[in-house]
């Protein structure tokens, strides 16, 4: 089942077409928002959030990469997603493919 939601652009701004919100497949967008959010950002789900920006400022050692990978897997599962591909690379060119 494909999740749909109001879509945003790459800057997080609402997408509007013909005077109305754009609605479409949103799994990738949900994953992006989870990556950006810190734990506690969502009041209804206080443990949701990966905090990628704080991870980018860390040393990026193996322990940090494993912690990031674990956060992504836990958050995806909590949102009902299945991870098809998770390639973190050097964090500047990640590839995360999810589905429901």
Image (spheres, helix red, strand yellow):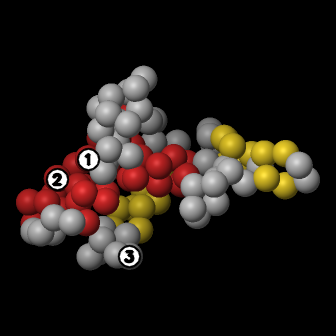
Q: CA distance from mark 3 to mark 2?
A: 18 Å
Residue ranking furthest to the right: 18
Disc 3 + disc 1, Cβ < 8 Å? no
Q: Under tag 1, what secondary structure?
A: helix
Residue that appears at 40% across and 26% down: 43
Residue pointed to by mark 2: 67
Residue pointed to by mark 3: 93
| Left or right for 44, reference 56 | right
Q: Residue 74 appears at what percent x and percent y?
A: 29, 41
Residue that appears at 72% across and 48% down: 24
Residue that appears at 42% across and 23% down: 44
Q: Under tag 3, what secondary structure?
A: loop
Disc 2 + disc 1, Cβ < 8 Å? yes
Where the N terminus falls, by quadrant?
Answer: top right
- Residue nearest the viewer, comparing 61 with 58: 58
Image mark for residue 4? none
Residue pointed to by mark 1: 71
Instruction: Look at the picture and state if 84 lies above or below 23.
Output: below
Q: Is residue 56 visible?
A: yes
Q: CA distance from mark 3 to mark 1?
A: 18 Å
Q: In the picture, residue 58 is in which quadrant?
A: bottom left
| Left or right for 86, reference 10 | left
Q: Residue 60 appears at what percent x and percent y?
A: 15, 69
Instruction: Look at the picture and state if 59 lies above or below 49.
Output: below
| Left or right for 54, reference 36 | left
């Amino acid at each position: 089942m494909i999740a749909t939601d109001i879509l945003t652009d790459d800057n997080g701004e609402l997408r509007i077409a013909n005077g109305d919100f754009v609605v479409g497949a949103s799994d990738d967008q949900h994953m992006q928002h989870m990556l950006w959010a810190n734990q506690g950002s969502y009041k209804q789900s206080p443990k949701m959030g990966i905090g990628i920006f704080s991870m980018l400022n860390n040393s990026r050692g193996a322990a940090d990469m494993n912690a990031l990978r674990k956060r992504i897997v836990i958050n995806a599962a909590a949102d009902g997603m299945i991870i098809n591909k998770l390639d973190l690379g050097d964090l500047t060119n990640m590839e995360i493919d999810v589905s429901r």
